[in-house]
Image: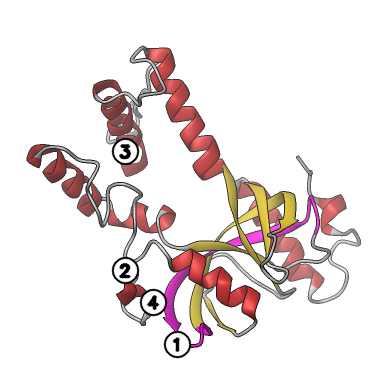
Amino acid sequence: SRVVLSAGNNPEPSKEEQLVHKGCQALETYPPRHHTASSSGIYQCLYQTILNSHIRFQAPVFYMPTSVQLGSPYGLHFFEPRYRLLISDCMRSFPVSARRGEEIKPCVPGLSPSSNNITTVSQNAEVQSLLENNKDIMKEHYLPTFIHAHQSPLRRNTPACIVQVRHCIIQPDGSADVFLQPVSYIWIEEIWERPGTGSLYEARGIRMPKDESEKYEMWCVMSRYGRGDGRGWAQMLPIP
């Protein structure tokens, strides 16, 4: 079935709904090579993209137990070799200026800042207009990110936080000062050490829904003043 935009009491679709609709239209016009142009192939592709790029999340891990809260930015100084590698990897696809303290702009793979995959002037103008009109949404999904494992132990089913790099200065020796914005919590599904990186870990997880994130933050706040509700987070929250 096709994507249906909001109607009834809310006739004006949200920006997110408009983007999904435009994505469906784009897939119909320019289907990926490994999918058919049929409706089933188009929506299967869209579903897989949303699942793998937005519901599931994989990234390198910075491990430091501490208190974090969604929407509350904080700064870190990276000096260990493994975390110098982490920030280098995160910033690799962004312009050099973004690593020198200048504004970090969203980088959409294949579209922005490079548009080599776009073949005509009209297509390029349409894409640039779409990006310009949805800056806020782009910033939610296309800034450099990594996982801050702020709870111990570092293992499967432990909560962790996805953080965006909002400001970054990388020094000539690879050390870095970063300003971070927590944007989402995840349950860690799998974690492993990258070979030859001096104990830099990589993890894959599933994002917590909004209501689950709120419960988790409430537990974190309560636990600072005692034992919360008497249970640990593993007993308080359902583990997928």
Q: Are marks 3 and 2 in contact (CB under 8 Å)?
A: no
Looking at the image, tell me whether mark 1 or mark 2 is earlier in sequence order: 2
10 Å crowding of disc 3: few (<14), some (14-19), many (20+): some
Residue sticking out furthest to the front: 196
N-term-proximal mark, 4 vs 3: 3
Residue 99: mark: 4
Indicate whether residue 74 is drawn in magenta.
Answer: no
Residue 138 x/y as whole percent:
35, 53
- What separation in Å lies between label 1 and label 3 (alpha carbons)? 40 Å
Which-is-in-front pick, marks 4 and 3?
Answer: 4
Kindly identify which residue carries mark 1. 172
**Is residue 216 positioned above or below 222 on the image?**
above
Q: Which residue is mark 3?
A: 19
- Residue at x 27% of width, y 36% of height: 12
- Reading the chain from its start, which is encountered first: label 4 or label 1? 4
Residue type at the position of mark 2: Pro
Which residue carries the number 2 mark? 95
Q: Tell which of 210 and 129 is nearer to you.
A: 129
